[in-house]
Amino acid sequence: MLSNKPHIRNLVEICAQKGIDQVIISPGSRNAPLVISFGEHGAFNCLSIPDERVAGFFAMGIAQQTRKPVIITCTSGTASLNFAPAIAEAFYQKIPLLILTADRPVEWIHQGEGQSIAQRNVFANYVKRSYELPQEVTDKDGLWSANRIICEAIDQTMEGNGGPVHINIPFREPLYDTANYTDTALPKIIETTPFEKVLPQQTLKELANTWQQSKKVMILAGLLPLPKAGDALKASPALNTILSKLNEDATVAVLPEITSNLINESFIYNFDSVLSTVTEEEIAQFQPDLLITVGGSFISKRIKLWLRKHAPKAHWHIEEIDYHIDTFQGLTKTIKLSATAFFEQLAKVSDTLSMQSNIDISNVSDTSKVSDTYKTPDTYQATWKNREIQIQKVQKKYLKQANWSDIQAYKLILPKLPKNTNLHLANSTPVRYAQLFQPRKDVICNSNRGVAGIDGSTSTAAGAAYITQRPTTIITGDISFFYDSNAFWQHHLSPDLRVILINNGGGNIFRFIKGPDTTAQLSTYFEAQQERSAEYIAKTYILNYFVADSEDSLKTALKSFYKKQSNNRPAILEIKTPSVESAEIWRTYYNFLKNR
């Protein structure tokens, strides 16, 4: 017994036939036809999350892990606007969401009707496509039109790199009437046929020639999509494999950010710290001839500013997009392929790459081998790797003498994460601190770096924990944590979820960056100092609570925090650190490296 509105019955059936199975519902009345139909169909796992902002990020956390479209639906009015932060983040992370917003009848918009706003195209800047279904379907042509729109919208969520798609659905009352469709024919399904993108041979030869002539090749990797749930732990095993082999070429330096999830011991991870030590006389040694960027938003402001100032001769950005992303202001080519497909095609076009490294990269499987090329002096990779090895030694020395602070907390936390942890890093300081340390092979990292807002970090991690049912830890700052505390106001929290709250009394990032710390408004308006604790939030939502305020107490708390909780509920570990001293130790760290 589904809604008696035939186009809604078909919408639900088409979603089922196209493999969508997760539906996040925010309560309301205008979306009753959708709620009834998804709830009664039987092919869907329907979850109720009252706060639309949380619902959007929770759904994004699921889709981030599964790489399958997740439906979010809400009632009319401002409810839809509360989806906007998650939709924007999903758009820039290229995460598939299908947004179904119920709307008032079109004739009542701007007529003083309750819960009515102009919803058509309301997310236009942050979705791949916007659609609106017919208000009423009374004939064969109307149903045909609705079915075509629905099929196209769903396919668009997965087209190319994927992303969010919006369908606005105006409803007239009655909203709760149902019908039995047992004897009704199933709707026709329209499919989009996938195809493999291949660069022309002449283009590939030209690219291979540029590669061969470049003696300093930097491959810089930002945020990369995760595989489907249940696949290999890392973001792209195939990409990791071919980059590992390319990295055996001494002219190549691979610099992955933590959110790329690319792992090889000879990659250069702490390049932010390395750059802080490069003198004017050494710039030419570190500056690439050819820069190749893969993945999304980059965390490191230092490397962005450095490459803008010291531009390479050529910069290729590899991504399936319809516009130019010139983050480093030196872009010469946009290559609309996946990174894996690009490197595989480039390798096959000639013997150039294999000749340079004396290896066959067309059929490789070993991703664990560590290149020794950096031990040979005066090569581009050696320049980066040898400096990084020096930095790691200096970093250990610095951390031994540093007082209790944020950075000391991360030093203790990261090695203690359970194996195969899905680590979520909130924006501002958490993702930056984590990038100071070498990534672990058995930990996968996520972060909302599409827009890089502080909103929704906990909700995203909660969605990921729910769908994967594996150890999931989010490390978050206090402003981000309290801002998203409604993440716990739901019935779908996984017992595998662990929340680590670094509470330094405000937005400590504003003590790091130049500018805010010189104003009289720092503490009140930029840092937004606060003295709250998470203890009573934990009690409100029946979450297990632990607290630490020193190295010794943190070591003790981590042991209990990661044990299975007797009440089978998630846990919060609140770590209290000094605000002013944490910022000072961060600044001193970079000065210490320069004076190594």
Image (tube, rainbow, N blue to C red):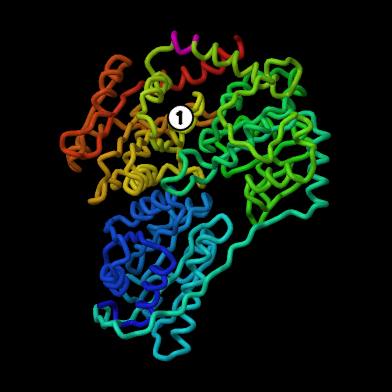
Please tell me which residue lies in front, 516 or 456: 456
Q: Which region is colored magenta?
A: 397-401
Q: Is residue 172 magenta?
A: no
x%, y% of residue 1? 25, 78
Query: Please, which residue is most extreme toward the bottom here?
Result: 139
Residue that carries the numbered disc 1 in the rendered image = 520
Q: Secondary structure at mark 1?
A: loop
* Above or below for 225 versus 291: below
Residue at the spot 53% in from the left edge and 71% down from the top edge: 191
Residue at the spot 68% in from the left edge and 53% down from the top edge: 336
* Above or below for 461 versus 42: above
Please tell me which residue lies in front, 170 or 139: 139
Taking the image as drawn, is residue 539 in sight? yes
* Above or below for 198 versus 344: below
178 with respect to 433 (left or right): left
Amino acid type at image mark 1: Ala
Q: Is residue 398 magenta?
A: yes
Chief secondary structure of the magenta portion: helix
x%, y% of residue 96? 47, 57
Residue at the spot 29% in from the left edge and 71% down from the top edge: 41
Q: Quadrant of residue 34?
A: bottom left
x%, y% of residue 315? 74, 41
x%, y% of residue 254? 64, 31
Image quadrant in which the C terminus is located:
top right
Q: Quadrant of residue 502?
A: top left
494 with respect to 348 (left or right): left
